[in-house]
Image (cartoon, rainbow, N blue to C red):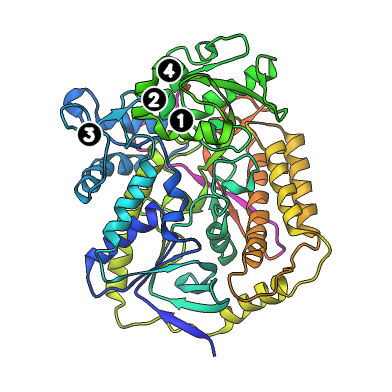
């Protein structure tokens, strides 16, 4: 007998977007039962790792304005952002900053008590609202504490969702593994929201938590929804070696310098106006160009790198504004940034792509929304500006929570009547196809080969030969017999979860490479050395990838929404 749980709203993922959605939905009506399903404990969600800030226009009386933030976002996206979405983000986020403040968020403040903001890359005004250098942790703690005030929010920690249940294009629920006992469960509701984050662990050198695998993206893809713009992978300029842990852009916002082996502050040669505070794609390309010109350093691991110098900021400022960064440097690089520069290199940090959705976060399935990094409503286009990601999580968490609640209220007492057919097919896929599978390839070695391939073949600079070779390698790895689980325990079988994660990683990595091969231009974070120019005539459009029955993605195009700004050359 299939175990079935019934709720009014299902939220998969417990990061910023998921918690914000839960609060909005719960406050809509106390009789709505909201389930938050998370494969980790709530405060282990990767949102806690956000460091630098949340972008918002707070002080128009001091010279900032809404239109400037909209334009900076669109220009930063290399004009691939849907402009109605950028407008929604910018107009909505100031109220979220104030709401968080009222819920107890410990924003860093000026001497006069007003919320402080710092400079961030690509902006015309200091608008990164911050809490020292731990903004994600404090935002998560604030939202989690607020969630606990609602009796109608139910947390399912360490539940791994494997597939979407649907009738045609109507959402009905999810299949899940309760990790503590291994039970396979059907959870149904009239409304669902996917908030599972990005796919950054398809790279080895990455700022993401090891749990940040593309399970949510792959669920949507296998159910028949499109993944959009997956070729646009953001490489943050400052990942420390060898771990890839992030040094926040706030370090450069506070005045840090990037220097080469000649002691030169080289960004003056690439972005004369913005210097280190040019958008991330510009800075990362500049760094790799310096390394390729022989002006880099050699890390003890043999990796090429450059250095981030904060020493001139002084001990007091670093302790006050960048205490977390100092601690990370000491623990993971053995360097105290007060005393010496720290070695850094561009690192996989964010996916501009995700599940195809509209300005409201609605997917192609009725009753199912997506918010946060799992979404591609095209807020960020080809390149995200720093501090706009936590903004996106808060805004579309709130929007989708409201819309999901409205639908749930309209369907109250009308439980989706799912049959067991999809449940049984999914049970066969994961238990017969993976758990009881047999093979001679070590899945962990396969995962390492996959992520190393992405590092090598789809990094900051790309070309046709590398991308095609990368795709061949991924497909060769897919064909090996790695779908087997040596640990046959039912309780907390992380081996089983890991192999299912690899299954998702394979499909999503293939889509990233195919999108990059098809986009024969350079735009934002997608830089092709064989097609070095932006090509608006042929590629001012979004990439869509649909699942085909033969296993290979079907690639299509989708128009960009323009409301106010025509594309121009991007200079900083």
* Secondary element at tag 3: loop
Q: Secondary structure at mark 1?
A: helix
Give the residue number, with chain letter if any, for mark 3.
115
Mark 3 is surrounded, within 10 Å at the Cα level, by few (under 14), some (14 to 19) or many (20 or more) other residues, namely some
Which of the marked residues, 3 or 1, is nearer the chain's N terminus?
3
Q: Magenta region's main secondary structure? A: loop
Q: Position of residue 226 (x, y in %)?
A: 54, 56
Instruction: Find numbered disc 2 in the image and state the secondary structure of the residue it sits on.
Output: helix
| Earlier-in-chain disc, 4 versus 2 | 4
- Say left or right for 38 vs 487: left
Q: Residue at x 16, y 26 (%)?
A: 61
Q: N-terminal of the two: label 4 or label 1?
A: 4
On the image, numbered disc 2 is attached to which residue? 318
Q: Residue 538, can we see it?
A: no
Lower sequence index among marks 3 and 2? 3
Q: Quadrant of the C terminus?
A: top left
Q: Which residue is mark 1?
A: 326
Asked if residue 58 is among those painted magenta in the image, a careful observer would answer no
Q: Residues within 10 Å of mark 1 (few under 14, many from 20)?
A: some
Range of the magenta residues? Answer: 550-568
Query: Of residues 209 and 406, which is closer to you in this image?
Result: 209
Answer yes or no: is residue 502 visible.
yes
**Camera-side mark, 3 or 2:** 2
Q: Residues within 10 Å of mark 4 (few under 14, many from 20)?
A: some
Evaluate if marks 2 and 1 touch, with contact meaning CB atoms under 8 Å apart: yes
**Label 4 secondary element:** loop
Left or right, 246 with reference to 85: right
């Amino acid at each position: 007998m299939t175990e079935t749980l019934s709720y009014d709203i299902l939220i998969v993922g417990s990061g910023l977007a998921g918690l914000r959605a839960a609060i909005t939905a719960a406050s809509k009506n106390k009789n709505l039962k909201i389930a938050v399903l998370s494969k980790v404990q709530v405060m282990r969600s990767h949102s806690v790792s956000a460091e630098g800030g949340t972008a918002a226009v707070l002080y128009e009386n001091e010279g900032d304005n809404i239109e400037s933030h909209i334009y900076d976002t669109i220009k930063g996206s290399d004009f691939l952002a849907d402009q109605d979405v950028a407008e929604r983000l910018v107009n909505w986020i100031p109220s979220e900053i104030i709401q968080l403040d009222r819920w107890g968020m410990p924003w860093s403040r000026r001497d006069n008590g007003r919320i402080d903001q710092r400079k961030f890359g690509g902006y015309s005004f200091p608008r990164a609202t911050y809490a020292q250098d731990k903004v994600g942790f404090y935002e998560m703690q604030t939202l989690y504490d607020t969630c606990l005030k609602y009796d109608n929010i139910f947390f399912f920690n360490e539940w791994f969702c494997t597939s979407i249940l649907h009738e045609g294009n109507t959402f009905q629920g999810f299949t899940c593994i309760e990790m503590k006992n291994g039970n396979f469960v059907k959870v149904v509701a009239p409304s669902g929201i996917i908030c599972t984050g990005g796919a950054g662990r398809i790279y080895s050198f990455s700022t993401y938590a090891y749990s940040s695998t593309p399970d949510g993206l792959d669920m949507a893809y296998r159910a028949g929804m499109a993944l959009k713009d997956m070729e646009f992978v953001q490489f943050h300029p400052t990942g420390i070696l060898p771990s890839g842990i992030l040094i926040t852009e706030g370090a450069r916002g506070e005045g840090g310098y990037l220097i080469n082996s000649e002691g030169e502050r080289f960004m003056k040669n690439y972005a004369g106006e913005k210097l280190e505070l040019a958008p991330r794609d510009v800075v990362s390309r500049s760094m790799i160009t310096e390394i390729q010109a022989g002006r880099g350093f050699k890390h003890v691991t043999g990796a090429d790198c450059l250095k981030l110098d904060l020493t001139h900021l002084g001990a007091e400022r670093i302790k006050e504004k960048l205490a977390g960064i100092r601690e990370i440097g000491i623990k993971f690089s053995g360097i105290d940034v007060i005393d010496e520069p720290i070695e850094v290199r561009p690192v996989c940090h964010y996916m501009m792509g995700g599940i195809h959705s509209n300005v409201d976060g609605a997917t192609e399935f009725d009753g199912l929304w997506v918010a946060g990094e799992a979404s591609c409503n095209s807020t960020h286009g080809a390149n995200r500006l720093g501090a706009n990601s936590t903004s996106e999580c808060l805004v579309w968490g709130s929007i989708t929570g409201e819309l999901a609640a409205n639908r749930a209220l309209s369907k109250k007492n009308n439980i989706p009547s799912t049959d067991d057919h999809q449940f049984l097919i999914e049970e066969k896929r994961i238990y017969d196809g993976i758990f009881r599978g047999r093979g001679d390839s070590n899945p962990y070695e396969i995962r390492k080969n996959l992520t190393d391939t992405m590092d090598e073949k789809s990094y900051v600079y790309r070309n046709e030969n590398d991308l095609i070779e990368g795709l061949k390698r991924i497909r060769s790895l897919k064909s090996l017999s790695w779908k087997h689980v040596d640990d046959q325990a039912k309780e907390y079988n992380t081996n089983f979860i890991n192999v299912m994660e690899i299954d998702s990683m394979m499909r999503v990595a293939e889509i990233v490479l195919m999108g990059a091969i098809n986009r024969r231009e350079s735009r934002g974070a997608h830089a092709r050395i064989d097609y070095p120019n932006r090509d608006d005539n042929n590629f001012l459009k979004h990439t869509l990838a649909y699942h085909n029955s033969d296993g290979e993605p079907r690639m299509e195009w989708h128009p960009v929404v323009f409301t106010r700004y025509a594309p121009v050359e991007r200079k900083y």
